[in-house]
Image: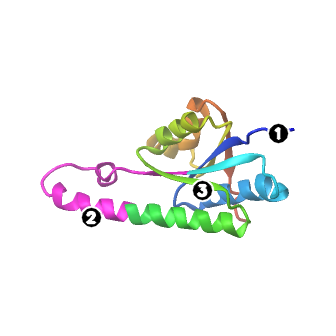
Amino acid sequence: MASAEKQPMVVGIDDSEHSTYALEWTLDHLFVPCSANPPFKLILVHSKPTPSSAVGFVGPGAAEVLPLVEADLRKIAARVIEKAKELCTSKSVHDVIVEVVEGDARNVLCEAVEKHHASILVVGSHGYGAIKRAVLGSVSDYCSHHAHCTVMIVKKPKSKH
């Protein structure tokens, strides 16, 4: 009897500790216990901002600044991907697809869900309060309302001092 194709799982990754925690939690709870035959096909997606959105201005001097910003954004993306791959390898999860897509994280993740026909999307929570969420926007909140799949928001436990 042929085994069923694994369901795609998209995990949003960025350079935050919340994202790293969400990926580690996902690997520990959904991949490592069944490392011989994990139930999901793992797809890591990093949203790289456009240089103009990262700078936040357009005007005189932008032509000189944007290439430098683009180079920095590429370095950050490479660091994020390398860290995520190392984490997966450390947990003996080797069958991983990694994508870097330019754009707003909210749209990039929802589009990745559609592209891969994902059954689940995992995102970390930065733990913003209502005011910060209103000003900065919340990727997890947006995805929970707009992604056409189950969305798992992983919150990093608060450290006790």
- The residue under label 1 is which amino acid type? Ala
Circle 1 Cα neighbour tier, 10 Å, few/some/many (<14 / 14–19 / ≥20): few
| Mark 2 nearby-residue class (10 Å; few <14, some 14–19, many ≥20) | few
Q: Are marks 3 and 1 in contact (CB under 8 Å)?
A: no
Please state the extent of the stretch shown in magenta in the rendering: 45-73
Which of the image's four quarters has the C terminus? bottom right
**Measuring 47% from the left and 38% from the top, which residue is drawn there?**
107
Q: Quadrant of residue 64?
A: bottom left
Of residues 124 and 70, the one drawn nearer to the viewer in this rendering: 70
Disc 3 or 1, which lies upstream in sequence? 1
84 vs 56, left or right, is right
Instruction: Answer whether residue 156 is magenta in the image.
Output: no
In the displayed orientation, state which residue is furthest to the left: 60
Spatial separation of the CA atoms under disc 3 and disc 1: 35 Å
Q: Nearer the viewer, mark 1 or mark 2?
A: 1
Residue 161 seen by the camera:
no
For marks 3 and 2, give the CA distance: 26 Å
Residue identifier under label 1: 2
Q: Is 102 on the left-hand or right-hand side of 95? A: left
Q: Position of residue 76 (x, y in %)?
A: 44, 64
Q: Quadrant of residue 121?
A: top right
Q: Give the residue type at disc 2.
A: Leu
The reply to whether dot 3 and dot 2 touch (C-beta < 8 Å) is no
Please give the label number shown on residue 25: none
Secondary structure under the numbered disc 2 in the rendered image? helix
Q: Residues within 10 Å of mark 3 (few under 14, many from 20)?
A: many
The quadrant of the rendering that contains the N terminus is top right
Residue at the spot of label 3 = 19
The residue depicted at 84 percent of the width and 57 percent of the height is 33
Residue at image coords 46%, 64%:
78
The image's mark for residue 68 is 2
